[in-house]
Amino acid sequence: MAKRIHMNAFTQCCIGHHSIGQWKHPLDRPLDGYRDIHYWMDLARILEEGFFDTLFLADVHGTYSVYRGSRDAAVRYGTQFPSNDPTLIIPAMAAVTQHLGFASTFSTSYFPPYHTAKLFSTLDHLTRGRVAWNIVTSYLADANANFGLGEMMAHDQRYDRAEEYMQVCYQLWEHSWEEDAMQRDRERDMLIDPAKVHEINYRGEYFNVPGPHMCEPSLQRTPVLYQAGQSGRGVAFAARHAEGIFAIHPNTDACRAAVRELSAALALEGRSRDDIKYFPGVTVIVAPTDAEAELKLETCRQYRSPEGALALFCGWIGVDISKLDSAQSLRDMHTDSIQGLIDYFSIVDPERDWTLQDVGDYLSIGSVMPKIVGSPQTVANELERWMDEGECDGFNLVPVTQPQGFRDFADLVVPELQRRGRMRSAYDGETLRESYFGRGQARLNERHVAHRCLPEWKR
Ligand SMILES: Cc1cc2nc3c(=O)[nH]c(=O)nc-3n(C[C@H](O)[C@H](O)[C@H](O)COP(=O)(O)O)c2cc1C
């Protein structure tokens, strides 16, 4: 049987996420919607009607100021600026849906793990087990400064610190409260059994956390864990911790190679390929016919802001490409930001001498996502090809206009994928983890490293 496609919707609480400039498009609504709770509630309803697994929310804490050594382009064109907090909109969206999951990006570099553990437990309670955490180590130098952290830690050290961070979170979520600690015993006047709530007494290089966890166990205990880093360290981290991966690949060959690299890394951690879902990002423009979809793309192109898109890309890779002769020369560079994207243009077209203008034009619609433009049949064919050749498990959908692009996908592509037996017509189970891994799988499975991160009392 053909593998089922899982769909996530990818966005951010901002006006310009990946297609910078579309705020001028008459159909694009985030201009006012991003700060309106009803916009988010409507979006959640659209996604649940389309059987999406998750609304996936990115987040950043600084401006994109690498391009031309200034934040001017990012501010002028609204490149992920302004950007509101993604965690606060989740409960309102959960209240108007029953199955849709909500993944929020939260950086290990800025917030202490005790705070993160409490926040995600609260969200898991309020969503009845439908929350996921996109674990990022981040990349913006001025975000670091905004948190008063001084110079940004080196790339690999950020991952070292994140490793310890996860140990603290697991001990709080999985090992602080025993399953039956909450007694609610009126006769004995015992709400909670103190003998079943434990300090974790974590002492490490970066963190010292006594505990106990402030929240009783939620339906999933640990939120579904997402990760989005593609360097060697990123892949090793994902193989150890993640249950979902958000990746960016220009073509199916690159996707397949990355999935196979990850599979090998998973084996080293005692986990299997089935323990993880792999989601490349895609930008889709769909209309009833191929010609109409091309026309839609042309309309979107009228509203693009290439300089804003360049600000985004330069912020990601930490290199000001306006200073280079060609984006081709990025190929052998090392960066302390998103290492996995540095050779992107050499992979998209190794023969082309990418000028600054080419790069800006290319990125202004859907940034680094592969673009799929066409009728529902054309889009479904291409998504099936990615599934089969890229060996992925579904996609993070990044539409050009929002929420129209999500609506179009739900109305036009989902029925086509359902006809082909590639998308479901009902949700599995109640929690987000069950939506990905099947009924009865609300908790982390027994192979996950969280079960081996034991605090003193349990050793
Ligand atoms: C597809 C993708 C999405 C990401 N989204 C975010 C984000 O929303 N916020 C953030 O601070 N970092 C984000 N990151 C940064 C990563 O979490 C990671 O810190 C960074 O990519 C450096 O690691 P790497 O070199 O292993 O990719 C993202 C990275 C990738 C590849």
Image (cartoon, grey):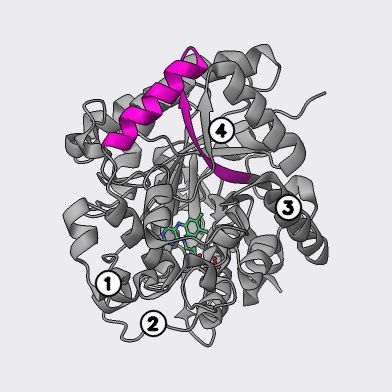
Distance, label 1 to label 2, CA atoms, is 20 Å
Q: Amino acid at mark 1?
A: Arg
In the rendered image, the quadrant that contains the C terminus is bottom right
Does label 2 or label 4 sit earlier along the sequence? 4
Callout count: 4
Q: Residues within 10 Å of mark 2 (few under 14, many from 20)?
A: some
- From this view, report whether residue 61 is shown above or below residue 443: below
Question: Looking at this view, is 103 or 284 the one in front?
Answer: 284
The residue stretch that appears in magenta: 279-302
Q: Which of the labelled discs sits on residue 318, or is there none?
A: none
Distance (Cα) linking label 4 and label 3: 18 Å
Of mark 4 and mark 3, the one earlier in the sequence is: 4
Q: Tag on residue 152?
A: 2
Q: Is mark 3 within 8 Å of ligand 1?
A: no
Q: Is mark 4 within 8 Å of ligand 1?
A: no
Image vertical order of residue 120 relative to residue 237, above or below: above
- Which three-letter amino acid code belongs to the residue tagged 4? Met
Q: Residue at x 26, y 47 (%)?
A: 14
Q: What number is the disc on residue 68?
A: 1
Instruction: Please tell me whether residue 407 is drawn above or below residue 17 in the rendered image.
Output: above
Disc 4/disc 1 C-alpha distance (Å): 36 Å
Label 1 secondary element? helix
Instruction: Return the x and y of residue 99 as percentages of the image width and height.
Output: 50, 27
Task: For ligand 1, tell me if the residue under mark 1 lies within 8 Å.
Answer: no
In primary-sequence order, the first of circles 1 and 2 is 1
